[in-house]
Image (cartoon, rainbow, N blue to C red):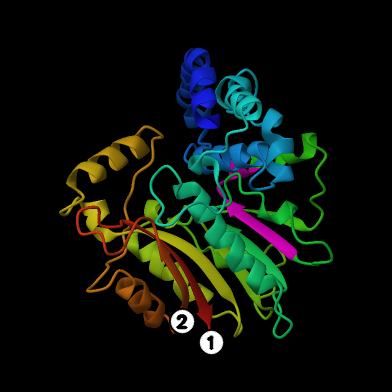
Amino acid sequence: MRGLIFIILMIPIIPLWILGVAIFTWRIRRVIIPQNISGTAAEPYGARLMLHMVGTRIDNAAYKIAEHMILYAQPVRFLMLQATWLALKISGYKGFFFAYPGPRPSNVVTMMSHRSHFFDRSMSEAFSRTENSVEQLVILGAGWDTSCYDLPKGLDLNCFEIDMAPTLNVKKQAIEKAGISHDHVTFVETDFNQESWMDALLTSGFDPNKTTYILWEGVTMYLTDEAVNSTLALFSTLPQGSVIGADFFTEDMVKGNPPHETWSKRTHAGIKYYSEKIMFGIPTGESLSEGSEKLAAKHGLALTKFENLGDKDDKKKVPWYVFTEMAKK
């Protein structure tokens, strides 16, 4: 019954949502892209913002900066998110697409919830270790990620956010306008495909002798093979106990190999909309995790966690997106 009430309430809201998407699209094409600000960072941020509004995953920092982020500034936030939230509130419905951690196997609708839960759990377990505890947190390709601003109470970490200057500058301005404390965060400007992120970190106060957690979420698919392997090689120089959380598209999906021909074309077209390009995909092998295991082993790392979008045993809808945790042993 609640689901039916939600659907009825959404009928007059759909035109508002379409208008919101139109304004959002205009801002992407006319404001974000011309200034070289990351557009692909908007979607995972929007998903986490909606989960917070629904109350299934709390992200106070994401909510506070929303009004200062040009893409989600009003009226977009109301048209695309708040109107839907109001329908959910009135109906009392919390569909699977707003669930956290969400159902398994996951699908493209619940993908962001699954992804967020995987890395939330990975970081939580690493931060709660009593032996060889994590002392530094690095967000590679930080985009609009807010992990550095909702850390567990009592956790004293030096945080480093790495991304290209235009994206970092917009985010930093939003954080300052929202009044969010960021004294523990260092913003580091770099381009993964052009220069060494480790060199940039070292000149910004990063200590390579401290155990570190690196979050590398939603980035690898936009990098070259050389940049991906170079990043893992640099990570392997960090102390034992350091952890890197990373997600990968599969090589078959990126190249459009069967059975991913249609979805590959749609994904490439969707990313091209943001003036970005998908370049890297991880081989899978006989088992879905085999490619991740080999990539980790290539750099002297251990694959300590692995999950995938969809059902690994589904022969018709073969998973094309994987979430990994690798550790320096």
Q: Is 258 left or right of 135, judged from the image as shown?
A: left
Q: Secondary structure at mark 2?
A: strand
Q: Residues within 10 Å of mark 2 (few under 14, many from 20)?
A: many
- In magenta, the rendered stretch is 158-168
**In the picture, residue 51 is in which quadrant?**
top right
Residue 225 coordinates in the image, percent (x, y): 33, 63
Q: Which residue corresponds to the image point at 83% horizontal and 39% vertical from the top-left?
A: 179
Relative to 242, is 194 above or below?
above
Can residue 147 be seen in this snapshot?
A: yes
Residue 181 x, y percent position in the rendering: 82, 48
| Of callouts 1 and 2, the N-terminal one | 2
Q: Are marks 1 and 2 in contact (CB under 8 Å)?
A: yes
Q: Residue sitting at 78 percent across and 36 percent down?
A: 178
Between the C-alphas of marks 1 and 2, the distance is 6 Å
Kindly identify which numbered label has been placed on residue 301.
2
Question: Quick check: can you spot residue 191?
Answer: no
Is 167 a magenta residue? yes
Q: On residue 329, which mark appears?
A: 1
Indicate the amino acid at tag 2: Leu
Residue that sits furthest to the left in the current view? 258
* Pick the front one: 49 or 302: 49
Picture quadrant where residue 91 is located: top right
The part of the image, by quadrant, that contains residue 156 is bottom right
Residue 213 on image: x %, y %: 62, 70
Q: Residue at x 23, y 41 (%)?
A: 265
Q: Compared with residue 70, is residue 223 higher up or lower down, i.e. above or below? A: below
Identify the element where label 1 is drawn: loop
